Amino acid sequence: MLGFKELAKPENLRSRGGAWFRHGHIEIHLGVEKNFHPAGKAHPTFAVRQINL
């Protein structure tokens, strides 16, 4: 939906889980944390500005 493509992680980091994504010059690295407990209202957010092409 946002246009991000999944990247192949380096071999030495693949066993850690998670995923990497890229769209243009923006990269997002998502990780996995054992016993993670999110805050009740925590969520990721993206600030996007319109670019006139």
Image (cartoon, rainbow, N blue to C red):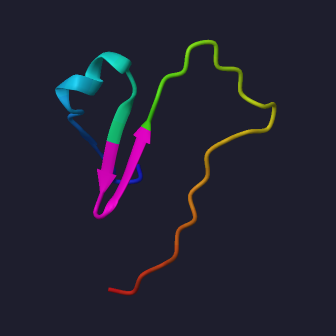
**Residue at far top of view:** 35
Residue for point 24% across, 40% down = 7
Our reading of the magenta stretch's main secondary structure is: strand
Quadrant of the rendered structure where residue 23 is? bottom left
Q: Is residue 45 above or below residue 47?
A: above
Quadrant of the rendered structure where residue 36 is? top right
What stretch of residues is rendered in magenta? 21-29
Q: Is residue 28 above or below residue 8?
A: below
Q: Is residue 24 magenta?
A: yes
Q: Is residue 50 left or right of residue 21?
A: right
Residue for point 24% across, 33% down = 9
Q: Is residue 43 above or below residue 16?
A: below
Q: Position of residue 15 (x, y in %)?
A: 30, 16
Q: Is residue 49 above or below residue 53?
A: above
Q: Position of residue 32 (x, y in %)?
A: 49, 23
Q: Is residue 3 magenta?
A: no
Q: Is residue 12 left or right of residue 48?
A: left
Residue for point 81% across, 31% down = 40
**Quadrant holding the C terminus:** bottom left
Along the line of sight, which residue is nearer the eye, 38 or 23? 38
Q: Position of residue 35 (x, y in %)?
A: 63, 12
Along the line of sight, which residue is nearer the eye, 51 or 26? 26
Q: Position of residue 42 (x, y in %)?
A: 73, 39
**Residue at far right of view:** 40
